[in-house]
Image (cartoon, rainbow, N blue to C red):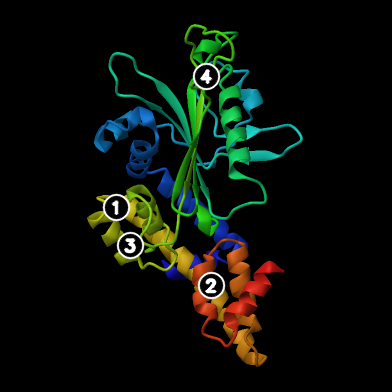
Amino acid sequence: MISNINKAVSSCEEGMQAYDSYVKKILADKVIIARILKSVVSEFEDYDEEIIKTCIGDNIEIGERPVDPGLTNSESIRGISNEDNVPNEGVRYFDVIFTAVTPNDNKQIKLIINLEAQKKMPGYTIESRGFFYCARMISSQLETEFTGSDYDSIKKVYSIWICMNVAKEDENTITKIYPIRKDVYGQSSEVRHDFFELVIIRLGSYGDGKGNELQNMLKTLFAPKLGNSEKKKILENEYKIPMNKDFSKEVDDMCNLSRVVFEEAHTEGHEKGIAEGRVEGDLERLAKLVKKNIISLDVAIEEASEYENGKELLLSMIKD
C-alpha cells in the first residue's frame, strides 16, 4: 500500500489532491453523515443514528461528476447536480452533496445537504462562501425540484462546513446561521422562512481536551499523526464508529497517504539540509506543507523544534 501511494505522490500538490479525495469519501460515509446530522441538523436531533442512516438518500455525490446546471435545468425533474457553474467565475464543486428525508410519517420533509471540509482558512470569511453555496443550492432547484413558478416547493438546504486549523479563539465552536422572520410594523400571518441553514463546525487540535463529542470524533478522524490502528480503535471504542471493511480501508488509505506525503517531503528537506550544512531545507519543506494545509502548524512546530531556533525560523518562513 505504501509503495503504491509513494508512486502516486510526486509532489505536495498531487498528494494533497489525493488526500482531499479520501477526506471527502470518509465524510460521504452514511455512518459519519448520520453522526453529523444528529448533532447539527434540527430535523434529525430527536432520532437515533440508525434511523437517520435510513433517511439518507443513495444519491451521495462526492464532487467527481461534473454536471452543467444549465443543461440540468433544461431536463425534467431528476434531483440535484453536484456542481454549480457560475458564468465568468469558473467551476465550483461541492465536496459532498445529497438529499435526506425526515422520518416523520405524517409530514416528511426533503432536505438537500452539503458537507464541506475546509482544511485551511482562506482570505475571505467562510460565512460568505457558505451563503453563496446555500444560494446556489436553492436556485439550482428550478426544473430539478420544482417547475415554473411553484416556489413553495423549494426544498430547505443545509451547507455544513467542517473547518480545521482555525484561529485559536475560534477553536471548538459551532455556529448556525439561518433567516429569521420579523414583523417591522403590525403582525402578518405566519409564512415559511426556513429555506437554508449554514452550519460552521470549527475544530481544535486532537487531544486538546475541548469540544463536544462530534468535534472530538472529527478531530480523531483527521488527526495527522495518529497511527492507523490507534485511530480506528479510538473511533470504534470511544465514538462507536463501526470499522466495516470499506470504511476501515478509507481510513487506512487516508492515514497512509497523509504520513507518506509528510515523511517524503520531510526526508527530502532533511537530506538537503545535511548536504548544505543547514536546516533551512527541513524548515522550508515544513513551511510548504503548512501553507498547503497538508500538516497542521502544531505538527510542523513540533518537528521544527528539533533544531535550534527552528520554531522561530519556521514561523518567519510561513509568514513570507
Q: Confirm whether residue 57 shows in the render.
A: no
Q: Secondary structure at mark 1?
A: helix
Disc 4 residue type? Answer: Arg
- The mark closer to the camera, 1 or 3, is 3
Disc 1 residue type? Answer: Lys
Q: Label 1 vs label 3: CA separation?
A: 15 Å
Residue at the far front: name it: 185
Q: Secondary structure at mark 2?
A: helix
Query: Disc 1 marks which residue?
Result: 245
User: Which label was assigned to residue 23?
Assistant: none
Query: Disc 4 marks which residue?
Result: 181
Q: Quadrant of residue 283?
A: bottom right
Query: Disc 3 marks which residue?
Result: 231
Q: Label 4 vs label 3: CA separation?
A: 44 Å
Residue at 35% x, 39% y is: 39
- The mark closer to the camera, 3 or 2, is 2
Disc 1 and disc 3 in contact, CB within 8 angstroms: no
- Looking at the image, is mark 1 or mark 3 earlier in the sequence? 3
Q: Label 2 vs label 1: CA separation?
A: 32 Å
